[in-house]
Structures are given as structure tokens and as C-alpha cells.
Image (cartoon, rainbow, N blue to C red):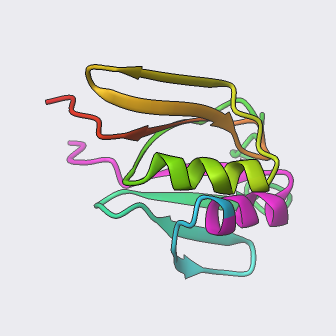
Amino acid sequence: MIVKLMEVTIPARQYAQTRYFYSRVLCLPVGKEGQHHAFFDTGGSFRIAVVDAAQSSSLTMPTGRGAFLNLCCDDLDALRKRLDHAKVRILAENSDEFGRNITIRDPEGNTLNIFQDGSFG
């Protein structure tokens, strides 16, 4: 029986750039790291794993379109400044009764929605 989500794994064709994006642009702390992978702490019981696609098993097929992440942040304005500084293109920006969010893509083309003040309960 499945009891919880452990992680979302992103096979990266551009490993160094993708690792930099998650660690330096999004400021996610690196939990464990190996020569060809990094696990990023998301502040809860889930993590994001970035693996070097050139070093991963043949079962991992990096498409650059596979993962879709929903992340929460506590200061969307500060994150927006970091994204602008890093020249990350904002695909969409919205606000509603649940909070505010921006949509971006990482260097592999994976979509990320980043929310602030979201309440979905």
C-alpha cells in the first residue's frame, strides 16, 4: 500500500544548470547529494530529486516536460526579484481568493507553480 509521496524526481540533461536553479535561484537547501544527484529539502516530508540524466538508469527518460511542481513560498516578491535577476521568464502570474502564484520553467523545461498565502483546505 502507498502511504505517502516521498519525492518528485527530475532527470536533468543539463544537470549543473538545473542543480544551480533549484539551489541558488529557488534557494532550496540541499539535503543529501552524490556525484550525479541532489536531494532538495522542501520544508516538509517531501523532497525534489535532481539526477544527471546521462548517469541515470535506462528506465529514466528525460523529456524536459514530465514534472509539474507546485511549491509554496513565504515571500513571492523576493522570489520574483531573484527570478528576474536570474533572467527566468515568468509564464503566468495570478492571484485569487487562495493567494498569489507565478508559473515558470526550470532549465529542463519542467513547469513550476509557486504559491504564496495559499489555503486549499
Q: For residue 41, which quarter of the picture?
A: bottom left
Farthest left residue? Answer: 121
Instruction: Name the residue located 86 percent from the left edge and 55 percent from the top edge.
Output: 14
Nearer to us in this view, 85 or 17: 85
Instruction: Name the residue located 20 percent from the left edge and 47 percent from the top edge.
Output: 3
33 vs 8, left or right, is right
Instruction: Name the residue located 65 percent from the left edge and 32 percent from the top edge.
Output: 66
Q: For residue 92, which quarter of the picture?
A: top right
The N terminus lies in which quarter of the figure? Answer: top left
Instruction: Name the residue located 52 percent from the left edge and 48 percent from the top edge.
Output: 77
Nearer to us in this view, 88 or 36: 88
The C terminus lies in which quarter of the figure? Answer: top left
In the image, is residue 62 above or below residue 66?
below
Q: For residue 50, which quarter of the picture?
A: bottom right
Nearer to us in this view, 53 or 103: 103
Nearer to us in this view, 17 or 82: 82
Q: Position of residue 81 (x, y in %)?
A: 65, 52
* Residue 22 inside the magenta-drawn segment: yes
In the image, is residue 101 above or below residue 54?
above
In the image, is residue 82 above or below residue 117?
below
* Residue 3 inside the magenta-drawn segment: yes
69 vs 50, left or right, is left
For the magenta stretch, what is the residue range? 1-24
25 vs 54, left or right, is left
Q: Position of residue 15 (x, y in %)?
A: 80, 61
Total count of labels? 0
